[in-house]
Image (tube, grey):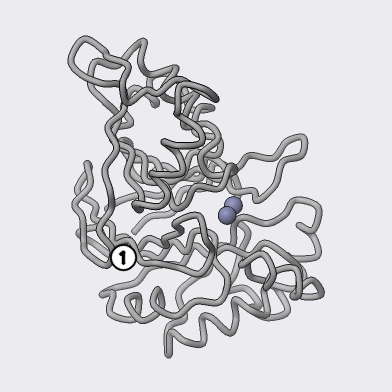
C-alpha cells in the first residue's frame, strides 16, 4: 500500500499556510511549494520531485531543496515534469542568475539535480513501487495532472486546472480508484475569476466529477485560496455533503 502525505495544501500565502507539496511514499515529492520544511532525514530520502507545472507556488522551494540536499546527499535528485515546465524552471529560475543552476553543480557522484521530461499518458514507474501517468490539464505553465497507481489501488491528483476533459477520460480507466485529490481554488461566487485563471470552484468541480460516471470515492480538496477557506468549505459541503473534505498539512491518504 502507498501513501500520499500532505506537506502543504494551500493555494496562497498567509501566516500559517503552506504551499502545495505532497510526499508520495518516502522517496517522491509531488510539487515543491513547501517541500524544504521536511526534516533533513526525510529530505535525504527524496529521490525524485514530480512537478505539476511551473507556477511559483509549486516550484518555489525546489531551489531550497537542492541547496539543502547537496550537502548531505551523494546522488542527484531527479526533477520530472513536462517539457514546457522544465524549460520554464531552467530558463527563469535555476539559471545561475535568480538561483544557482543545480543541474551543473556537482556532488561527489554527479550533478545535484537531473531533469527528466515526462511523457504524457504513459505509466512511469517511480521509486517505492508506485507508478504515475501525467495527463495534460487546462492551466498553462506546462500543467499536468497525475494519475497514481500502487499495487493495491489508484488515485487522481488534478494539480492546478480549470475545466478539463482528458484527465477524466484517462481516470475512468483506473482500476480500484481510492480517492481524488482535486484543486478547488475559489468559492462558487467567484466563478468568473476561477475561469479567467484556469481554476475550479466547488460547483465547477462537481461538474468535472460528473464526467466520471458512477464514481463515488472520497474527494480531498486542496489549493484553496486561504482567504476564502470557510466559504469554499461551505460551498463544498452544499455540493458534496460528506464526500468532500479539505486536505490539511499532515494528512496521510492510503491507496
Ligand atoms: Zn498554477
Ligand atoms: Zn498553484
Return the x and y of residue 224 as percentages of the image width and height.
68, 57
Residue 249 in percent (x, y) is at 58, 43
> Residue 176: image x %, image y %?
29, 73
The x and y percentages for residue 113 are 31, 28
Q: Residues within 10 Å of mark 1 (few under 14, many from 20)?
A: many
How many numbered callouts? 1
Tell me which residue sits at (41%, 60%) in the image: 144
- In the shown orientation, is residue 241 left or right of residue 40? right
**Front-most of 70 and 148?**
70
The residue closer to the viewer here, 217 or 171, is 171
**Quarter placement of the C terminus:** bottom left
Observer-nearest of 185 and 23: 185
Quadrant in which ligand 1 is drawn: bottom right
Q: Is residue 162 left or right of residue 168?
A: right
Disc 1 is placed on an element classified as strand
- Compared to residue 127, the image places residue 135 above or below, namely below
Q: At 34% across and 51% down in the image, what residue appears?
A: 83
**Residue sitting at 52 percent across and 22 percent down?**
97
Q: Nearer the viewer, residue 215 or 65?
A: 65
Please tell me in which quadrant of the rendered image residue 103 appears: top left
The residue pinned by badge 1 equals: 154
* Vertical comparison of 70 with 94: above or below: above
Q: Is residue 138 shown left or right of residue 177?
A: right
Amino acid at each position: 500500500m502507498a501513501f500520499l502525505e500532505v506537506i502543504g495544501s494551500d493555494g496562497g500565502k498567509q501566516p500559517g499556510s503552506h504551499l502545495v507539496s505532497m510526499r508520495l511514499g518516502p522517496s517522491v515529492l509531488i510539487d515543491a511549494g513547501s517541500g524544504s520544511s521536511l526534516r533533513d532525514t526525510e529530505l535525504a530520502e527524496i529521490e525524485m520531485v514530480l512537478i505539476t507545472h511551473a507556477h511559483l507556488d509549486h516550484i518555489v522551494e525546489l531551489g531550497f531543496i537542492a541547496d539543502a540536499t547537496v550537502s548531505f546527499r551523494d546522488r542527484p535528485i531527479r526533477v520530472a515534469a513536462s517539457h514546457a515546465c522544465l524549460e520554464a524552471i531552467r530558463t527563469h529560475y535555476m539559471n545561475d542568475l535568480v538561483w544557482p543552476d543545480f543541474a551543473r553543480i556537482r556532488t561527489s557522484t554527479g550533478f545535484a539535480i537531473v531533469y527528466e521530461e515526462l511523457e504524457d499518458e504513459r505509466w512511469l514507474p517511480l521509486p517505492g513501487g508506485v507508478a504515475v501517468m501525467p495527463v495534460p490539464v487546462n492551466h498553462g505553465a506546462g500543467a499536468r495532472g497525475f494519475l497514481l497507481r500502487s499495487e493495491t489501488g489508484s488515485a487522481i491528483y488534478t494539480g492546478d486546472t480549470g475545466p478539463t476533459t482528458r484527465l477524466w477520460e484517462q481516470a475512468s480507466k483506473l482500476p480500484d480508484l481510492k480517492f481524488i485529490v482535486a484543486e478547488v481554488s475559489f468559492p462558487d461566487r467567484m466563478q468568473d475569476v476561477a475561469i479567467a485563471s484556469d481554476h475550479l470552484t466547488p460547483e465547477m468541480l462537481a461538474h468535472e466529477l460528473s464526467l466520471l460516471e458512477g464514481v463515488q470515492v472520497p474527494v480531498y480538496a486542496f489549493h484553496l485560496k486561504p482567504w476564502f477557506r470557510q466559504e469554499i468549505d461551505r460551498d463544498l459541503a452544499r455540493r458534496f455533503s460528506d464526500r468532500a473534505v479539505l486536505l490539511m498539512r499532515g494528512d496521510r491518504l492510503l491507496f
